[in-house]
Image (cartoon, rainbow, N blue to C red):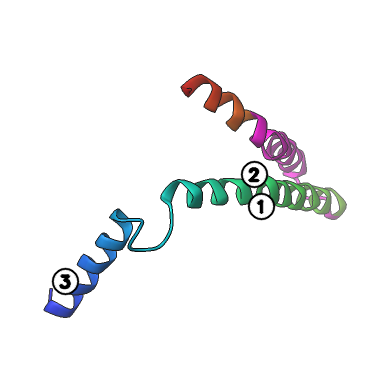
Amino acid sequence: MNKKHLKTIILLITIALLPTVGFCSVESTLSAIQSKLTSTILPLVAILGLVFAAFSFITGNENARSHLKLAIFGVIIGFSAPSIIAFLRGLVN
């Protein structure tokens, strides 16, 4: 490993370990990521799963039933994710 790569790695580790160097808070950043995942991305992926399962039924795919089961499971997880996280936080705190 040459010196340039070593300096870059040390700089990245310093920024990651010292939030004031990066002008951010790790907790608020993780909270924002969690909020974006549970409020936007998970429901969107769940709906896309249902659309894919419906497309499987329309095209006559032999695995359409399993696609539908997985899509419904994804919808349940996707839309109940905020409640699951609140429950787990309650257990920890």
Task: Please tell me which residue lies in front, 11 or 18.
Answer: 18
Q: Tell me if 82 is positioned left or right of 21 in this view.
A: right
Mark positioned earlier in the residue sequence (2 or 3): 3
State which region is magenta: 59-83
Element type at marker 2? helix
Is 29 drawn above or below residue 76 in the view shown? below
Numbered circle sitting on residue 41: 1
Q: Quadrant of residue 88?
A: top right
* Rendering coords of residue 19 (x, y %): 35, 56
Question: Tag 2: residue type?
Answer: Thr
Q: How far apart are the two marked residues, 3 and 1, measured between alpha carbons?
A: 36 Å
Residue at image x 75%, y 45%? 62
Give the crowd class for mark 2: few <14, some 14-19, many >=20 residues within 10 Å. Answer: some
Residue at image x 69%, y 33%? 80
- Report the residue that reaches farthest toward the top: 91
Q: Which residue is mark 3?
A: 6
Q: Which residue is mark 2?
A: 38
Residue at image x 69%, y 34%? 73
Element type at marker 1? helix
* Rendering coords of residue 50 (x, y %): 78, 47
Question: Tag 3: residue type?
Answer: Leu
Q: How far apart are the two marked residues, 2 and 3, measured between alpha carbons?
A: 37 Å
Q: Looking at the image, do the residues carrying marks 2 and 3 touch, with CB atoms under 8 Å apart?
A: no
Is 21 drawn above or below residue 7 in the view shown? above
